[in-house]
Image (cartoon, grey):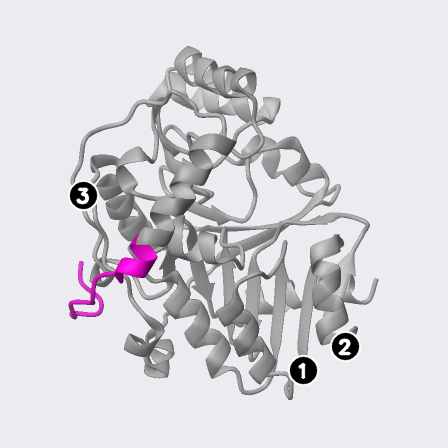
Amino acid sequence: MKFFGKKWRRPTGLIFLAGCVLRVIDFFQLASLELKSWEANWHTEIVTTDQLSWEYLSGLVIVTWELLSSPKKSFPRRNEIVNRQNHLDGWIYSITDDKIKKTLQMVASKNGIRLIAENKIYQWSKKEAKKLVDFFEKAGIDYRSDDALGTNFVHAKTFIWDQDFIIQTANLTHSSFENNREFFFVSKNPIIKKNLEELFAQDRNGTTLKPEEIHPNLLFCPIDCRAKIETLLQSAQKSILIYNQYITDDRLLEIIKTKTHLPINIILTDDDDNQKLLDYFGEKIIKLIKKMRIHAKMILVDDRFLVLSSINFSANSMDNNREIGIILTDPTLISSFKKIFYSDWNS
């Protein structure tokens, strides 16, 4: 399925070299899971921001269904994310929640689960890594690592069910549902679902993904997510709202700096690094939250374009990881998001 109909340039040697350096660092810092892998001659083509005009935004379609958030007592999805399904495909960074594991085992016992899972989870011990592998094996889950993808991490949190798909900011952990600010988008949109199925199959097979094969509403790092995020932020004419763990990417910070004449509200986790951003931009723009961990990765531009994704605002996340997001334009979903955002901003 081709959406852009254009061949994009390959990444520069500098991006390639930076990726190699990061993978060497990861080798020494991270415990590895011995996940199944496969041989492939993998490479990718990167869309740059100057190749993606603002006219791209006019081609976005309305994708709707249900926008959920955590933490809150009325949030029921921990047990419901997969227990009404017979089959599940997905990309996942980590799984530690026992209730989620039980529902995954149930689905695996029906028609199966296929996962692309990260094999170098940050700050995990070898014991923790082995425990996850043992769970996959015992549950009969067909799992593969990201080794053939050429990515630093599989950091996406996206699942394809029988009739639905879910793109979320949350890992499958207890804290994601009980302690973090997270968002979940569930939909039955058949076009997006089919495209995610195609992308999942290509990632599992280790085949090259091309930018024109990705639906305009989807963000798929490292192929097109930087270009789409930068284009959205640069297009802002009225306002920008952002949730994220942190912002360390210099290019995004530069774009935000050029938009400070607009109303900009950014909610971040309260830590020392983000305190520097508060000192730099001021309290009118930055809000640090203490009462819960901000793990959401959301952008709302001009009350028209809402991005929900797994993407942290770092160069590594956008340029080296497999991350997945979606751009939503449904006014009802945007209204729901704004109520939660301003509740946090005014708290």
Q: Which residues are magenta?
A: 1-16
Q: Is residue 7 magenta?
A: yes
| The magenta stretch spans residue 182 | no
Quarter-of-image position of residue 159 = top left
SS state under label 1: loop
Considering the numbered disc 3 on the image, is that residue within a helix, a strand or a loop? loop
Label 1 sits on residue:
263
Identity of the residue drawn at 76% across and 54% down: 270
For marks 1 and 2, the one nearer the N-term is: 1
N-terminal label among 3 and 2: 3
Amino acid type at mark 2: Lys
Identity, as a three-letter code, of the amino acid under mark 3 = Thr
Residue at position x 67%, y 68% in the image: 266
- The CA span between labels 3 and 2 is 46 Å
Amino acid, disc 1: Pro
Label whose residue precedes the other's in the sequence (1 or 3): 3
Say which mark, if any, is on residue 197: none
